[in-house]
Amino acid sequence: MMRPGTETELAELLQAARAPLAVRGGGTRGVALAGEGLETGGLSGVRLYEPGALTLVVGAGTPLAEVEALLAEKGQRLAFEPMDHRALLGTGGEPTIGGVVAANVSGPRRVQVGACRDHLLGVRFVSGAGEVVSNGGRVMKNVTGYDLVKLMAGSWGTLGVLTEVSLKVLARPQAEATLVRSGQGVAQAVTDMCRAMGTPYDVSGAGWAGGETRLRVEGLAGSVAYRAGALNAALGGGWDVVEGAESAALWQGLRDAAPFVGQPGAVWKLSVKPTEAPGLLGRLKAVGLDHEALLDWSGGLIWLRVPEEGDAGAAAIRAECATRGGHATLIRAGEALRARVPMFQPRPAPIARLEAGLRAKFDPRGLLNPGLMEGA
Amino acid sequence: MPAPDAAVLSKKPALVARLRKVLPAGAVIDDPAETRAYECDALTAYRCPPLCAVLPSSTEEVAAVLKICHEMGVPVVPRGAGTSLAGGALPTADSVILGVARMNAVLETDYANRFIRVQTGRTNLSVSGAVEADGFFYAPDPSSQLACAIAGNIAMNSGGAHCLKYGVTTNNLLGVTMVTMEGEVIELGGAHLDAAGLDLLGLVCGSEGQLGVVTEATLRIIAKPEGARPVLIGYDSLEVAGQCVSDIIEAGVLPVAIEFMDRPCIRATDAFSGAGYPDCEALLIVEVEGSEAEIAEQLEIITAIARRHDPVELRESGSAEESARIWLGRKSAFGAMGQINDYMCLDGTIPVTELPRVLARIEALSAEYGLDVANVFHAGDGNMHPLILFNANEEGQLELCEALGAEILKLCVEVGGCLTGEHGVGIEKRDLMGHQYRPADLEAQMRVKDVFDGQWLLNPAKVFPLEVSASRRAGGLAPRVA
């Protein structure tokens, strides 16, 4: 395992590399890769934190927990609510902020504030060719040149190894409340969630687990009380209200797909248009794919647990996603299944060609996590 | 701009004939009297009529045009509504202007999934207009929103006054239909979230029409807030006003907008609009949204912070008329400046915490160059808008103004900011890119263009310093297919 301590050291290491490397932050996201390990933990530390400008610049290898603790001291947080994969995947280690960015990990609040990539203001990385590249910066509005920041978010280390990330942070709200209604089927849940997202009450979470629909509002105490009431009324009334830590625990559970922890099977993450969720799940049942589902993002994110047999439903799931517009990522799988099924949804040929073209430019020798994101 | 390629110029008759075959009558404009309508965008100091202009009506027609231009090795400059302040749609004599103005239909509105799909020639404001009656709006609101097209918004990743809460174009763009320079139609993103693979959508947004021509867009729409109300705060010190902005942000309230004007701007706009602004060093307009009670709750926190800094004026709006009056001066700032003088509007961004230092330095530079500078900007996100006043009819003034502008933008970069926050690089800031990025950084960006447009035919002379992109453009401009 290689663990460079500086960006320069990393650049030299990549220039000299001759064989594939498995790039990892904390190694918590359960992707087993061929090649010698390349860990970013040595590239850590807070470079700049300006609460009054809502900006944080940190080394990519900085543990996420350290980042969150620092922000909490000033009453701030990463608004995109990154999930912790460890319990679901049974992995150890410490998630790093670079890992969060590389996988573009966003939680329930994505429907309100956007994804990790929407909060990423700047990056520094070393390309597969060993060149140090900087893009974006530390200001919220920046259209100077191409946005490689977005390209790097979610590129899973296949274009370059992140060394530094600059993020927009936001204030932690005074209060939160969740409207809860149990005994709801998936169709009713999606209808209610979509209606809630279309109200002016600034809903910051809309999910469904175990037949329970959950809608979250956050903000100043008076405002939260008002909006929870108004939302309840808009949905016809009769919803229970859960507040404070109890509300927070509900969302942390959904964020981390907690109901699937310790349960057997492969786990998929599907991204579709919210109103497609009930039809898609119904269709999978109809073709005989046994499953348990959780919904987040108003129904736009489907967590799916299926038996780990054959292709674990890959063909059926991916065909449904492709037809309806969307994609499916294989999040949890044993080694044998991983060998049979690619992690990412195959893309149409012209898109796959562009992606391959970019990889060839940034990592011409194919050193970084080779094969991980290929998909035509 | 680079000298036109004589070989391309000589192909005009053949090119026009081929374009006429794939486009309806009236969609190919090659008469020199008519092509002049496309000689510039809102950066009017630079003009050059194109070889010809085409106005396709569908994605298929765009694809047909690009295929022909690709085969013949002719550069293409995409154009939305032509409101770019950076010269993003400025043609060269050897290029085809591809305007999407005729493609302005709403293709789909979906309130349950909160999106609208439009053709990109549609104007920004009319996107909101299409969903307004049903209680929704499209958040990015550049000040040219009445005229500017979604195509240009995507090309420049446009912002607006309300970005602090709602983000810029890239944060509200879900998907696009794009035609590559080779004439291939591709779909990036859609009504679902996140990319299946690499985030090509994020890469295309803000690429200034250099990677493809975006013909359709899926945009996030949001439920309109119940209400909004501004408060006007005046200070006798720029520094104190800057500190007030930081304190508001740090306090955890997130206003939808924090606008900042300095004395020269306050005076000019007040005289022009009669908004009744106080005559002070710095004026803030802070707007919050929500129900009546929520607005009151937020304004209580904001005015308490403002009072701690001893304002010379603190005016809370008590009615829709008073709100309109508070916004009146700010909204007419550019018009007011245009009345007094010619002006050049910059849009560098700085870390909010650097405001006082940057404003003091701009004042010193203004004195040094002998040109007045008025500042009006989005303080919440650090996006400056220094307006340099000059007289275009006086010889040498434009050059002097550009030199001062360059100094100010370098200053923005020096304090940790950037050259442009929402207008784009275009030709205007092209040659300053070396101040923000090292050669390896620019090389990485140009490699992206190599992948999408190997011959460098799409809007080729923009964004990158000419000498830096020269070899690529030379390779690209030499037609591979005769």
Image (cartoon, coloured by chain):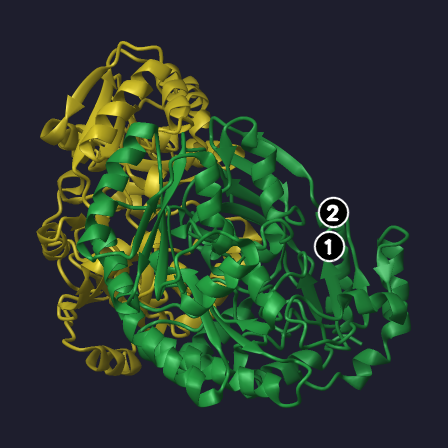
Chain colours: A yellow, B green
Q: Left or right? Give the position of B289 relative to B298.
A: right
Q: Which mark is residue B321?
A: none
Residue B197 image point, x, y percent: 42, 52
The C terminus of chain B - image quarter? bottom right
Mark 1 belongs to which subunit? B
Query: What crowding class fits label 2: few (fewer than 14 Cα within 10 Å), some (14-19), or many (20 or more)?
Result: some
Q: Nearer the viewer, residue B278 or B37?
A: B278
Mark 1: secondary structure: helix
The N terminus of chain B - image quarter? bottom right
Mark 2 belongs to which subunit? B
Residue A212 seen anywhere in this rendered image of the structure: yes
Query: What crowding class fits label 1: few (fewer than 14 Cα within 10 Å), some (14-19), or many (20 or more)?
Result: many
Q: Amino acid at mark 2?
A: Ser
- Note whether A179 is above or below B132 in the view shown: above
Q: Amino acid at mark 1?
A: Val
Give me the residue at 86% from left, 62% from top.
B29
Residue A146 image point, x, y percent: 47, 67
Q: Nearer the viewer, residue A163 or B320?
A: B320
- Note whether A326 is above or below B7 in the view shown: above
- Note whether B206 is above or below B293 in the view shown: below
Q: Which residue is mark 2?
A: B58
Q: Which residue is mark 1?
A: B62
Residue B345 image point, x, y percent: 53, 70
Residue B437 seen anywhere in this rendered image of the structure: no
Residue A126 image point, x, y percent: 30, 74
Give me the residue at 86% from left, 73% from top.
B12
> Same chain for marks 1 and 2?
yes
Give me the residue at 62% from left, 71% from top.
B87
Pointer 1 with pointer 2, Cβ within 8 A: yes
Mark 2: secondary structure: loop
Q: How far separated are the C-alphas under marks 1 and 2?
A: 6 Å
